[in-house]
Image (cartoon, rainbow, N blue to C red):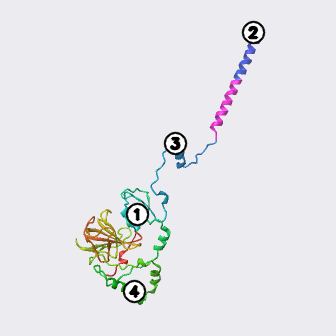
């Protein structure tokens, strides 16, 4: 009996030893797994989304691949083709055609539009129009006068035969495109300047007058817009004079010309009013390559 009990005790010690060893082994394994080196996921959000089968592809706006390129414009909140045309110095109808837009009212924020003719080099166009040009002013010109062709031709030749003492300005004029030389006229007869040019607050001149007073074309050009579709301008006319300059005539009572119509300097194009304004006035802008410039620096002295 004594031998049997001793044998049983030994067996129990062996079992307990085995069990203790297994427990230690399991504890070691668990501690190893808990102390495993951390793994950092270095994928960006786009890569994670691309690998996630439940993530839908992000729809990019039309033309996004051209964003930031010269000759292209990215649509901002509140933009319309008319405003984009004014900002870029282009006819909104041309922008519509260059971008194959079926509905000019359906453009979206972030969409990138071509604002130079197809095939045109945006960089070259920018460089070409960046040349400094000085407006030609005439102290004897009036807003309602349209000089006969012979008179205009002789006036154009006069500076060549009798150069002015300020020869420093001649190299700049020679470097500029000839079509940039425009003899501007005031768009109204009389009236006082209510508000001058300010790049932030006022992008042109506000000129006083009475309802129905005639509004004249400041230079020869073509009507690229006539309507009331641009908020803040009321009944508006935009004239394109060449590839560099546009003029805008806002808050009119009535419009007397239509889009695509050619007009001459001094021609009556509208009647002054207070559409979308707090009083009767003409808001007049000069834009060079779509950028507002101070009309007072272009118009002749009064």
134 left or right of 228 in image: right
Helix, strand or loop at disc 2? loop
Where does residue 142 sit, x and y in percent of width and height? 29, 81
Disc 2 vs disc 1: which is toward the camera?
1
The alpha-carbon separation of the residues under discs 2 and 4 comes to 142 Å
The alpha-carbon separation of the residues under discs 3 and 1 comes to 39 Å
62 left or right of 29 in image: left
For residue 53, the mark is 3
Residue highlighted by disc 2: 1
For residue 192, the mark is none
Choose top left, top right, bottom left or bottom right for residue 26.
top right
Precedes in sequence: disc 3 or disc 1 = 3
Q: Quadrant of the C terminus?
A: bottom left
Disc 2 vs disc 4: which is toward the camera?
4
Residue highlighted by disc 1: 95
Q: Which residues make up the magenta segment?
A: 17-36
Helix, strand or loop at disc 3? loop
Asked if one can make out residue 163 in the rendered structure from this viewpoint, the answer is no
């Amino acid at each position: 009996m004594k031998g049997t009990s001793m044998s049983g005790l030994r067996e129990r010690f062996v079992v307990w030893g085995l069990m203790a060893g297994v427990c230690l082994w399991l504890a070691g394994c668990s501690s190893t797994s808990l102390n495993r080196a951390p793994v950092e996921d270095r994928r960006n959000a786009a890569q994670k989304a691309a690998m996630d089968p439940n993530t839908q592809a992000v729809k990019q706006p039309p033309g996004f691949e051209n964003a930031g390129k010269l000759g292209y414009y990215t649509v901002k909140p509140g933009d319309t083709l008319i405003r984009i045309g004014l900002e870029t110095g282009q006819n909104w109808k041309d922008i519509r055609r260059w971008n194959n837009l079926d509905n000019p009212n359906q453009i979206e924020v972030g969409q990138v539009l071509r604002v130079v003719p197809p095939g045109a080099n945006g960089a070259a166009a920018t460089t070409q129009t960046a040349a400094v040009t000085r407006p030609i002013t005439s102290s004897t010109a009036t807003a309602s006068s349209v000089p006969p062709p012979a008179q205009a031709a002789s006036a154009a030749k006069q500076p060549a035969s009798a150069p002015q003492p300020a020869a420093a300005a001649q190299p700049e004029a020679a470097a500029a495109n000839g079509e940039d030389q425009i003899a501007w006229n005031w768009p109204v007869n009389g009236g006082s300047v209510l508000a001058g040019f300010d790049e932030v607050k006022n992008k042109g001149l506000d000129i006083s007058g009475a309802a129905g007073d005639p509004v004249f074309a400041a230079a020869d050009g073509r009507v690229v817009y006539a309507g009331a579709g641009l908020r803040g301008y009321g009944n508006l006319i935009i004239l394109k004079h060449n590839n560099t300059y546009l003029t805008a005539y806002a808050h009119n009572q009535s419009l007397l010309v239509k889009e695509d119509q050619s007009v001459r300097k001094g021609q009556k194009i509208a009647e002054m009013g207070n559409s979308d304004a707090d009083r009767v006035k003409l808001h007049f802008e000069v834009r060079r390559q779509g950028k507002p410039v101070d009309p007072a620096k272009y118009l002749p002295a009064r």
